[in-house]
Image (spheres, rainbow, N blue to C red):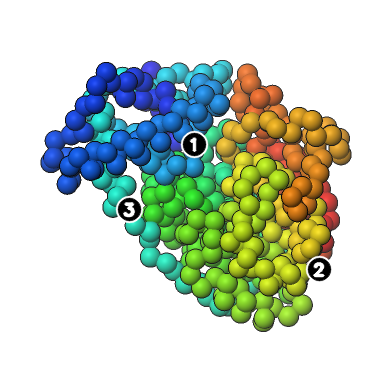
Amino acid sequence: MAEQPSNNKIVTYRSFGKAFDQPAPQPLTEPSAFESFDPAEDTALRAQLSAALAALEEETARQGPGMMASVQNQFASLLQSRMLEEPPPGDMTSLPPAREEQSAFEVKYDERDILGWVGSVFTWWKKIKPEPWLTASDTPEPIGRGRNLRLAMMADWGTGLYGAPACARSIESDPKPIDLLLHLGDVYYSGTVNEVRTRFLNVWPKRAGAISRACNANHEMYVGGEGYFREMLPAFGQKASYFALQNDDWLLVGLDTAYVDHDLAGDQVAWLDRLISRAGDRKVVLFSHHQPYSLLDSQGPKLVSKLGHLLGRKRIAAWYWGHEHRCVLYDAHPAWGVLGRCIGHGGYPYFREGIGQAPLVEGTVWRRLDTRNLVPGGVILDAPNRYVTGEEEKYGANGYLTLEFDGGHLNESIHDPDGSVLRERQIV
């Protein structure tokens, strides 16, 4: 079989074959290949490796053969990235796609001497440090056409697979003006320089006259933000991992919630306070990777606590985020008035599970979720993914959003990857 491009290859638990099924503990490697090797290092590596493999095994079993499987485990993500970029010596092959027309080729390693290579990955992991923090300007960038502004936005899109390329093509061919292209984070598996280039920048939509911006995310930070800070930000002409843009009626603010996981690092709170104090009557929309709240995932108490003074004053009109691989449009928060939107369905193959009993509303692709534990209710997209040939009904639809700001009004459209509109509302 011909060699496949790296952005079409995936690494799952199956990729490692039986390399770790040793009858007795094996030595990690020679000292020259694994610095400061000693029994303590051996113990630490084995513990981390066991946790990483267990997480990857569970997700691979859930996803099924031939499907991308990514976990919120840094070491597992680094192993996946390194398997593609600097594989261990031995017999590496690419399995044919598990489904007809499916574009992901699952790599497979058949040797049994992999622990030395894992030791080198462990050494690399220990040396990873966050890229230097960059400070954003206090002056928002002007954007739009007078009082009109339109943006296209995706989150958890950096797979290069499934519906992600189709989303990009539809955005490129959109007949309406687009002023801003926005990504809310996650390039898989760990945001390496190569992954940012092949799974993200090479596929990112091209629109003359539009600027691009990207929020930082946990998968980008698994390698310390190297690909994000060194490749993505310069490619976009973006000065920092948080940013602000405005027109006469709106202030759009992108936050970095990943430099410190699910939190706000640096001077972002004071910076946002200064922006809003000078924003006049402009309405404010926030964008981030992590969520302030969720009906189906973890909560964001650190984010809410640090921005509580703005939420409590109902100063935030809407907040868009990713992280959770769903599309959930929340009702206005009863205490804060904010309209929360989870749009993490950009390119990852996620399951349609846990919501089958929720009633269908607004046609056949939206279900109503009730308020629970002080989190407002809302509607969730429940449609098949036609980019997973043969198992369309098992996986949820990928897609993207467009937002159109017209004076003081905000129109929100949810798009299928082919560009068709699944829901459109004036929400402000």
Disc 3 versus disc 2: nearer the observer: 3
CA distance for labels 3 and 2: 45 Å
Q: Pointers 1 and 3 in contact (CB under 8 A)?
A: no
Q: Amino acid at mark 3?
A: Ile
Taking 148 as reference, is 109 above or below it? above
Quadrant (top left, top right, bottom left, bottom right) of the N terminus: top left
Q: Earlier in the sequence, mark 1 or mark 3?
A: 1
Give the left or right position of residue 283, taking residue 52 as reference: right
Numbered disc 3: secondary structure: loop
Question: Is 108 or 143 nearer to us in this picture?
Answer: 108
Q: What residue is pinned by disc 3?
A: 128
Q: Position of residue 325 (x, y in %)?
A: 62, 41
Q: Is residue 329 visible?
A: no
Q: Which residue is mark 2?
A: 408
Q: Earlier in the sequence, mark 2 or mark 1?
A: 1
Classify 253 as above or below 394: below
